[in-house]
């Protein structure tokens, strides 16, 4: 018997800049096994959304109106620990990374690296691992 096709990996994008979401969606949609199931503009919207849809991964910006990414990540992990969280941010300071880890985020990627490292970061989380932006390790 042949292998059963794996379930499409569902991703929710959360960033207050529509252009950033558009770029991220375009990169993700190059992979047939991944699908963006929603785009939201702040952490409060993602919490509301999780009441009726549970994606595999939430990609969160840190700086957003109403509810930022670090606090949103903490609340997501508290209510849905199975949902992976990838922080996608301009902030390359170690204190933000430490806060993201404490909040339960499995990945931390700088926006400067999205074009070359986004798919690697998603795949690492999808396989049950973690991801740290190469620029954060220097």
Image (spheres, rainbow, N blue to C red):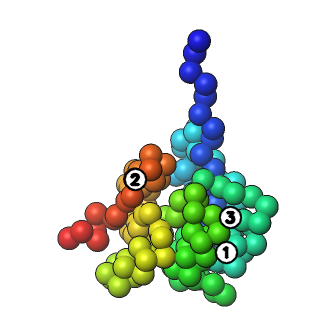
- Residue at the extreme left: 138
Q: Which element carries disc 1, helix, strand or loop?
A: loop
Q: CA distance from mark 1 to mark 3?
A: 7 Å
Q: Which element carries disc 3, helix, strand or loop?
A: strand
Q: Position of residue 108 (x, y in %)?
A: 41, 67
Q: CA distance from mark 1 to mark 2?
A: 26 Å
For the C terminus, give its image quadrant.
bottom left
Q: CA distance from mark 3 to mark 2?
A: 24 Å
Q: Nearer the viewer, residue 55 or 134?
A: 55
- Disc number for residue 76: none
Residue in the image at 58% along x and 59% along y:
83
- Residue at the extreme top: 1
- Disc number for residue 129: 2
Please indicate whether residue 49 sits to the left or right of residue 105 in the image: right
Residue 37 visible in the picture: yes
Residue in the image at 57% along x and 63% along y:
81
Q: Earlier in the sequence, mark 1 or mark 2?
A: 1
Q: Position of residue 74 (x, y in %)?
A: 55, 76
Q: Which element carries disc 2, helix, strand or loop?
A: loop
Please indicate whether residue 42 sits to the left or right of residue 91 in the image: right
- Residue at the extreme bottom: 66
Identify residue for label 3.
Answer: 39
Mark 1, Cα crowd under 10 Å, few <14 / some 14-19 / many 20+, is many
Labelled pair 1, 3 in contact (Cβ < 8 Å) = yes
Tag in front: 3 or 2: 2
Identify residue for label 1.
Answer: 41
Q: Earlier in the sequence, mark 3 or mark 2?
A: 3
Q: Position of residue 66 (x, y in %)?
A: 66, 87
């Amino acid at each position: 018997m042949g292998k059963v096709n794996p379930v499409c990996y569902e991703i929710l994008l959360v960033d207050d800049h529509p252009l950033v979401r558009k770029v991220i969606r375009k990169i993700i949609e190059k992979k047939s096994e991944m699908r963006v199931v929603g785009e939201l503009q702040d952490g409060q919207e993602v919490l509301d959304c999780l009441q009726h849809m549970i994606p595999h991964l939430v990609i969160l910006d840190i700086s957003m109106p109403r509810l930022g990414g670090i606090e949103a990540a903490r609340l997501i992990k508290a209510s849905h620990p199975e949902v992976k969280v990838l922080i996608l941010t301009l902030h390359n300071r170690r204190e933000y990374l430490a806060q993201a880890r404490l909040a339960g985020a499995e990945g931390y990627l700088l926006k400067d690296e999205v074009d070359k490292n986004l798919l690697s970061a998603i795949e690492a989380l999808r396989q049950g691992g973690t991801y740290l932006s190469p620029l954060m390790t220097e």
